Each structure stands twice: as structure tokens, then as C-alpha cells.
């Protein structure tokens, strides 16, 4: 029996799922409220900028993007298998998990170059 | 006592190229089980119909069939519950080869169950005059998982097993957990490779239907997903071993 | 003579049973949630480019298409949260000789945590938007 490397993607999937359950709906309501009620986008930008000064805040923002990306990529990857949509593992896995990794890296780049 | 329509999916390997449906009218009383109805057909209407059964009391696990699309033990299913539907559709368990009529071949499932070594493994031998004691709490830890009767309803309920019959599946992985959680057992290192494999816990996507259909409330979905946590930890420990230059376990 | 009939799983297997349809709906929550995460990622990019770009992103989030996506994502997030928390006590079982926690407590803790996390975030946002609070 060959050992599966699924524990890596499953752990990320689990962390993302937990995060989405704990703050997902609240986050969506929050961005709706932000975009709807904001009076002065410049001041909001300044407030968020000062909040993101702390590296831990940047790390938290990165987690809010990266973990849901891995979570949803994992579900969609397995969903395609369920729908009998098949392809080479390297291609599908590369697209979903590789895509989530690349986008997370970009997000880290943007956040940490603020 | 009224009657009810029973549609059985027939398959006779000698004559048939593929399964087909046959309609029977059977008596329907408050206390008649589906197994009673199948036996009525066999005895009174059509001796050529084949189905499996033994205990009539939900303990031997041999009478599993699909009833209106759901995996059920025919001895634990009552016709009275289908009066409203008006018709009972019966076919062999899904996801398994059909040997004949309502008889599914569960030998693949039995092989999967055997593979995970579902028995107590001891490396140290205890003296003959002392028992391996266990507290009630230690027993409660695996008790539900030990109630499995190997009926394979959970395999008929599992789309991942239907998709890939190499998947060890609910009952086998549950039994692996059952022994791994037993305080008297010392064999988990022999079972972990099966859990850790793609065909082990990692083919499961927690559909959860296996636990809904299980006639013994074993909750195989929970057992498998607790197995994922165990396999996850095992993966981390092994990674640590590899990093320290030790061999792959 | 043995000649077993080998069934093949039909491609549309999940349409034929309510339990499978519920499962597929749960899995499908991933699609709008991923798209919403991409929106957020775009927001971070625009934020990093400066105030003007950020303001443009904020007003773009008010376009009908973006609102529709956020509405669907909100429904998906709620379904995800409910189904996820319900499964936690079946996966996270703390039961050893040293420590045993009743699964009902595990469920309660996660329910309360999810409520607190989500409501807390909304309250924090409202506070941020309050004229005295920030923007
Ligand atoms: S886990 Fe339940 S459904 Fe599956 S074989 Fe055992 S008793 Fe039957
Ligand atoms: S006849 Fe034994 S379980 Fe139904």
C-alpha cells in the first residue's frame, strides 16, 4: 500500500473549512457593509493601512485568502472526480492546488510589500 | 389484509444479458416484513426468484437489498411503510456485482475487511492466568464500531466505493478503527499502512450516507474520518522521522 | 455457471438520491466561496495599489454582478458553516484515558465559536464604519 500525500491537502482543506465556518458568513456581510456604507474610502484605506502595519495582521489577512483557496480547491478537485470528469492527476492537481498556492504567494507578496 | 405491488429486478446469468424487472402482487399486513414478502413469492408465486437470508432478525447481515433506492435489510423493512408509495422496488445491493436476481456478491467487501486484520494483535504475551482487563470507558471507545454485521449496506450507499471498488470502504475502515481503539490491541502499526493509502481513508469525501443506512448505528463515516485524523498525525510523525534521516515507515 | 452482472456507476449517480443531492450541494458551496475569495484577493491587490484603486474596487463591489455573487456566496457560506460544524464532533473526538470530552460539548463549543466569530466580525465592521470609529 502506497502512502497517500492527501494529509497535506486535507489539513489545509480542514483549516480553511474551519476558518470559513467561523468567519465566512460574517466576512461576506462585512464586505457588503463596507462597500455599501463607506463614506470616505480614503479614510478607510488609511485605517486599514495602519491596522495592517502589524505583521500578525498581515498574516491573518493572508490566512483569510490562502486557507479558503485551498479549502475550495480541494472540494472542487474531488467534485470533478465525483462528476466523472477525469484528467491526468498532475494537470488537475496542478491546476487546483498549484493555482491556490500561486495565488496565495501573490497575496503574500502584495500584503508584505504594503 | 390488503396487497401491495412488488417489483423485483431479476437477473438470471444463464439466460439474461442484463437485469430486467418483474412485477408481483403480494399480501400486505401490518406485521409483514419485506423478507416475508420475498419468501411468499419464492414459496407461492415463483420459485425461480433468488434472494439471501438467514436469521430474520437483523443479525446475520445476509438479506441486504435496495428498497426503493435505499440499501436496507429486508428482514428489518416492513411492507406497511410502503403502503403510501403503493409499490416496493427491490433490487440487489448497488455498487456490487450481481450474482443472480437479488443476490449481490459481497466477496470483494469481505476481502477488504480481512485486509485490515480485524482481530486483536498482541506482541507481548500475557501470562495465561491473568486476563487483559479493560475499563468500561475503554470499551465504550470502540463499542459502537464493533456492532457491525458485515451486511455491506454501507458499501451500497457509498458513491466512492461505486466509483472505485479498490476503496477499502466503510465497514473495513471502521473495523480497522475498532481494533486500533481497543486498549488490548497492539497491532495499529500493521493497520496504519492500509488507512494511510489512497484506497484507505483518503478515498472518503464524507458523503455520510453510509452512516444513515447502517442498520446497527455503527456510524462508519465517523470512524473513517477519525481514521483520517489518525492518518494525518501518522503522516506528520513519519515526515519527522524522514527529516531525522530515519527510514520511511 | 457464474456470470455476474457488473454494474457501472452512472455519471449522474448523485441526482437519484436525496442524500447524494444534499452532499453535492454541500460540496458545491466551494464554487461561490472560491469566486468570493478571488474578489477579496482582487481587493487586496487594489488596496496595495493605493487609495484610488481601492475606492474603485469598493464601488465595483456594488455592481449588480458583484452583489449577485456576494449574495450567492453568503448563502453558500451559511450552508457551509452549518454543515461543517455539524460534522466536527464526528471527526474531532477527544477520548483518551487522560482526557475525555463529551461530543455534545465539542459541538456546542464550535456552534458558539462560529456564532461569536461571525457576529463579532460584523460588529467590528460596523464599529469601523461608525463615524467616530474610523472611516
Ligand atoms: S458498518 Fe453498518 S452498514 Fe456497514 S456492514 Fe457494518 S452493519 Fe452493515
Ligand atoms: S436475515 Fe439476517 S439480517 Fe436479515
Image (cartoon, coloured by chain):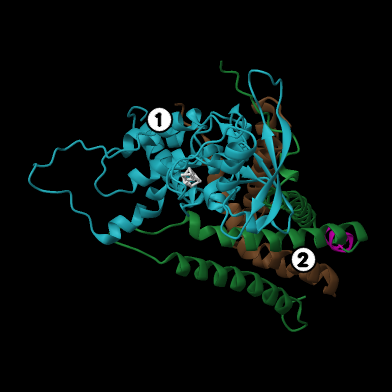
Chain colours: A brown, B cyan, C green
Task: Give the quarter of the image for residue B78.
Answer: bottom right
Q: How dense is the environment of label 1, judged by Cα within 10 Å: few (below 14), some, or many (20 and up)?
A: some
Residue A105 against residue C92 in the figure, above or below:
above
On whether ligand 1 comes within 8 Å of the CB at mark 2, the answer is no
The verdict on residue C55 being magenta is yes
Q: Which residue is mark 1?
A: B115
- In the image, C17 versus B105, the foreground residue is B105
Q: Is residue B91 magenta?
A: no
Name the residue nearer the viewer: B196 or B12: B12
Q: Main secondary structure of the magenta part?
A: helix
Q: As drawn, is C4 to the left or to the right of B240?
A: right
Q: List the single residue furthest toward the top.
A: C1
**Helix, strand or loop for disc 1:** helix
* Residue A12 spot, x, y in % from top left: 57, 47
Q: Quadrant of the N terminus of chain B?
A: bottom right
Q: CA distance from mark 2 to mark 1?
A: 51 Å
Asked whether the residues under marks 2 and 1 belong to the same chain, the reply is no
Q: Chain of mark 1?
A: B
Question: Which residue is the extreme one toward the front?
Answer: B44
In the image, residue C94 lies at what x, y percent?
39, 59
The answer to whether residue B219 is left or right of residue C76 is left
Q: Residue at x 43, y 38 (%)?
A: B235
Mark 2 vs mark 1, foreground winner is 1
Identify the magenta region. C53-61
Does any portion of residue B179 appear in the rendered image? yes
Q: Residue C73: horizontal and vertical position, in percent?
A: 77, 58
Q: Which residue is mark 2?
A: A31
Amino acid at each position: 500500500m502506497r502512502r497517500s500525500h492527501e494529509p497535506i491537502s486535507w489539513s489545509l482543506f480542514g483549516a480553511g473549512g474551519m476558518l470559513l465556518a467561523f468567519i465566512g458568513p460574517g466576512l461576506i456581510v462585512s464586505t457588503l457593509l463596507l462597500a455599501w456604507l463607506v463614506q470616505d474610502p480614503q479614510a478607510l484605506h488609511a485605517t486599514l493601512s495602519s491596522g495592517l502595519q502589524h505583521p500578525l495582521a498581515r498574516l491573518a489577512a493572508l490566512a483569510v485568502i490562502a486557507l479558503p483557496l485551498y479549502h475550495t480547491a480541494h472540494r472542487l478537485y474531488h467534485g470533478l472526480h465525483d462528476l466523472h470528469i477525469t484528467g491526468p492527476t498532475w494537470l488537475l492537481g496542478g491546476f487546483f492546488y498549484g493555482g491556490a498556492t500561486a495565488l496565495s504567494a501573490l497575496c503574500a507578496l502584495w500584503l508584505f510589500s504594503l | 389484509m390488503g396487497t401491495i405491488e412488488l417489483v423485483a429486478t431479476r437477473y438470471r446469468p444463464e439466460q439474461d444479458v442484463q437485469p430486467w424487472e418483474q412485477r408481483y402482487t403480494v399480501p400486505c399486513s401490518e406485521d409483514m416484513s419485506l423478507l416475508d414478502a420475498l419468501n411468499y413469492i419464492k414459496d407461492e408465486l415463483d420459485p425461480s426468484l433468488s434472494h439471501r437470508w438467514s436469521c430474520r432478525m437483523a443479525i446475520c447481515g445476509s438479506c441486504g437489498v435496495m428498497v426503493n433506492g435505499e440499501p436496507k435489510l429486508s428482514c428489518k423493512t416492513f411492507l406497511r411503510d410502503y403502503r403510501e408509495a403503493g409499490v416496493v422496488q427491490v433490487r440487489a445491493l448497488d455498487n456490487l456485482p450481481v450474482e443472480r436476481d437479488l443476490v449481490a456478491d459481497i466477496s470483494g467487501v469481505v476481502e477488504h475487511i480481512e485486509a485490515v486484520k480485524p482481530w486483536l494483535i498482541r506482541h507481548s504475551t500475557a501470562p495465561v492466568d491473568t486476563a487483559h482487563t479493560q475499563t468500561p470507558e475503554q470499551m465504550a471507545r470502540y463499542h459502537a464500531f464493533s456492532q457491525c454485521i458485515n451486511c455491506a449496506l454501507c458499501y451500497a450507499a457509498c458513491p466512492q466505493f461505486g466509483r472505485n471498488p479498490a476503496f477499502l470502504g466503510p465497514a473495513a475502515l471502521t473495523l480497522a478503527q475498532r481494533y486500533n481503539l481497543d486498549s488490548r490491541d497492539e497491532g495499529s502499526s500493521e493497520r496504519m499502512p492500509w488507512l494511510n493509502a489512497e484506497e484507505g481513508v483518503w478515498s472518503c469525501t464524507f458523503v455520510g450516507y453510509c452512516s444513515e443506512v447502517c442498520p446497527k448505528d455503527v456510524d462508519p463515516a465517523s470512524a473513517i474520518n477519525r481514521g483520517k485524523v489518525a492518518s494525518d498525525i501518522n503522516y506528520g510523525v513519519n515526515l519527522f522521522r524522514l527529516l531525522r534521516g530515519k527510514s520511511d515507515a | 455457471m457464474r456470470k455476474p452482472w457488473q454494474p457501472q456507476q452512472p455519471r449522474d449517480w448523485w441526482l437519484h438520491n436525496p442524500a447524494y443531492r444534499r452532499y453535492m450541494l454541500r460540496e458545491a458551496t466551494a464554487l461561490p466561496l472560491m469566486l468570493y475569495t478571488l474578489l477579496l484577493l482582487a481587493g487586496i491587490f487594489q488596496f496595495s495599489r493605493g487609495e484610488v484603486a481601492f475606492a474603485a474596487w469598493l464601488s465595483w463591489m456594488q455592481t449588480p454582478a458583484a452583489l449577485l455573487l456576494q449574495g450567492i456566496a453568503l448563502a453558500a457560506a451559511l450552508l457551509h458553516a452549518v454543515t461543517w460544524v455539524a460534522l466536527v464532533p464526528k471527526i474531532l473526538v477527544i477520548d483518551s484515558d487522560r482526557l475525555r470530552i463529551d461530543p455534545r460539548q465539542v459541538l456546542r463549543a464550535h456552534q458558539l465559536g462560529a456564532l461569536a466569530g461571525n457576529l463579532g466580525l460584523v460588529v467590528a465592521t460596523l464599529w469601523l464604519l461608525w463615524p467616530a470609529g474610523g472611516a
